[in-house]
Each structure stands twice: as C-alpha cells, then as structure tokens.
Image: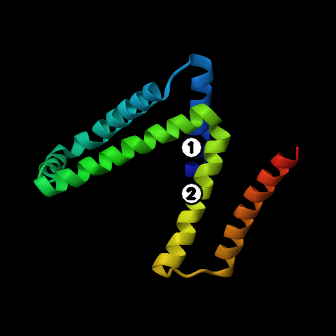
Amino acid sequence: LGLFLACDSFTSQYQTALYRKHGCNQYQLMLGGNLAGMAFTLVAALPKAGEVWEEICTILDGAVAIRVLILALLGASGQLFIYYTIREFGGVVFAWIMTARKLMSVVVSILWFGHGLSWTKAGCIGLVFGVMISQTVGKKKT
C-alpha cells in the first residue's frame, strides 16, 4: 500500500512537471506511458510465451474480443480524461479527485454489496472526507 501511494502521488506530480518543462501534450504522455507499459509487459511475458499465446488465442474468440475491445476503448478514454485533468488543473487536484473516487468506491461497495463496516472503516472514511471538505472550505475563505 505504501509503494502504491508513493508511486501514485509521484506519477501525477511528474506528469505535471513534464507538461510545464517540456510542453508535452496528453497524447504524447499517453503514447509514452503505453509504450513503456507494453515493453514492460513484453519482457515480463517472454518467459511464459506459450501460455501467453494460448491466452491471446482465447481473447481473439469473437465474444471475448468484443469485450476486450470495449475495455480497451474505455481505458483509453479514461486515460484521456486523466491527462487532460492533470494538464488543466495540476497533479494535486487530480490526486484529490482520485482520492474522492476511491472513497466513493469503498462507500458504494459497502452499500451495494453489503460489505461490513467496522468503526475503524467508518472513522477512516469520515476522516478523509473531513480533511477534503476542510481543505476545500479553507481555500474558499482565502
């Protein structure tokens, strides 16, 4: 979890720096990120090439291929929104948006799927929302 939080906060700040320093646009960042991700995946998949080929053949089946295509299109459109938000509003605003999204996902999961809600979970959710609200109210007063 700590590694995720460190990488998550670093990424949006680094993308903001790339926008400012090098004048990159969201399409260039998206292309670079996806090419790096593809290279990393290729290197990781090479030792299991036979198994990967079997999975590719399964994905190319008609019904699965349509679902994979829809998932890819939704993922790409999500990336466009992410890069646009970072370019227009900066990494800090994006981090707040993602924190709110993750918290809402937890709340919906608790309500929709009937997951348990301990006092600790409720306290943490309340604390994070409280900090976000106080930060927003504090900025409006200044």
Residue at figure coordinates x 32%, y 40% from the top left: 41
Quadrant of image for the C terminus: top right
From the top left corner, tell me how far across and down residue 45 is, in percent.
26, 43
The residue nearer to you, when weighing 105 against 33, is 105
The residue nearer to you, when weighing 127 against 133, is 133
* Mark 1 burial class by Cα count in 10 Å: few <14, some 14-19, many 20+: few
Instruction: Tell me the quarter of the picture where residue 78 sits.
Output: top left
From the top left corner, tell me how far across and down residue 9 is, in percent.
62, 43
The residue nearer to you, when weighing 96 against 77, is 77
Quick check: 128 above or below 71?
below
Whole-angstrom CA distance, mark 2 to mark 1, is 17 Å
Apparent side of residue 40 relative to residue 129 in the rendered image (left or right): left
Q: Which residue is mark 2?
A: 101
Q: Secondary structure at mark 1?
A: helix
- Say which of marks 2 and 1 sits in front: 2
Which disc number belongs to residue 141?
none
Residue at figure coordinates x 57%, y 24% from the top left: 18
Quadrant of image for the N terminus: bottom right
Q: Which residue is mark 1?
A: 7
Apparent side of residue 130 relative to residue 55 in the rendered image (left or right): right
Identity, as a three-letter code, of the amino acid under mark 1: Cys
Work out which residue is located at the far right of the displayed protein and give it. 142
Q: Secondary structure at mark 2?
A: helix
Residue 70 in view of the camera: yes
The residue nearer to you, when weighing 14 against 85, is 85
Work out which residue is located at the far front of the displayed protein and give it. 140
The mark nearer the N terminus, 2 or 1, is 1
* Mark 2 burial class by Cα count in 10 Å: few <14, some 14-19, many 20+: few
